[in-house]
Amino acid sequence: MRSLSPDDLVQTYLRALSYADAELATSLFTSDGVVDSPLYGMQAARDFYPALFADTASSVLTLRKTLVSADAATVAFWFDFDWVLANGTPAPFTVVDVAEIGEDGLITRLHIVYDTHPIRESWVAQNEG
């Protein structure tokens, strides 16, 4: 994939989440790119997105703000994630994703930051059931 501007990267990433498109999501990462998620832990991007989308019935994402470091090596994006779990349980949250960008313009590491307390019980119940 060609190098994207920070705004295009964020819009493409949010589109991938909205459509549960694991291939599109992982195309934004280096081959060894990782995701650090409060619910799923540290995983290779190629493993994280199929797991996330298996747990998802639907999602609506609303971007609040994109922040880019002066050298464009870090892009943070703050958005609302109106997530519905695969079992139909609503699990909405507000999140900040912080992407570390490599020299090739792809994400090397994505840090997902949000409070899991309001949704953890529902997520655990779905995954244990």
Image (cartoon, rainbow, N blue to C red):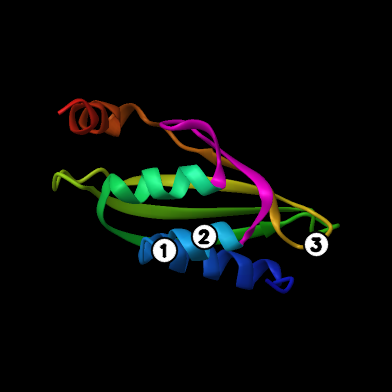
Residue 54 or residue 81, whichever sits in front: 54
Please tell me whether residue 122 is drawn above or below residue 46 in the rendered image. above
Q: Which residue is mark 2?
A: 25
Q: Quadrant of the C terminus?
A: top left
Q: Residue at x 33, y 26 (%)?
A: 117
Residue 51 or residue 92, whichever sits in front: 51
Q: Which residue is mark 3?
A: 104
Q: Earlier in the sequence, mark 3 or mark 1?
A: 1
Q: Which range is magenta?
A: 28-45
Q: Secondary structure at mark 2?
A: helix
- Residue 68: quadrant of the picture: bottom right
* 29 is within the stretch colored magenta: yes
Q: Position of residue 4 (x, y in %)?
A: 70, 72
Q: Which residue is mark 1?
A: 21
Q: Residue at x 30, y 28 (%)?
A: 120
Circles 1 and 2 in contact, beta carbons < 8 Å: yes
Cα separation, mark 3 vs mark 1, equals 22 Å
Three-letter amino acid code at disc 1?
Asp
Circles 2 and 3 in contact, beta carbons < 8 Å: no
Please tell me whether residue 32 is drawn above or below residue 104 in the rendered image. above
Residue 86 or residue 69, whichever sits in front: 86
* 12 is within the stretch colored magenta: no
Q: Position of residue 93 (x, y in %)?
A: 35, 44
Please tell me whether residue 56 is drawn above or below residue 105 in the rendered image. above
Q: Residue at x 58, y 64 (%)?
A: 10
Please tell me whether residue 19 is drawn above or below residue 96 in the rendered image. below
Instruction: Please indicate, yes or no, whether residue 109 appears anywhere in the rendered image.
Output: no
**Dot 2, crowdedness within 10 Å: few (<14), some or many (≥20)?**
many
Q: Secondary structure at mark 1?
A: loop
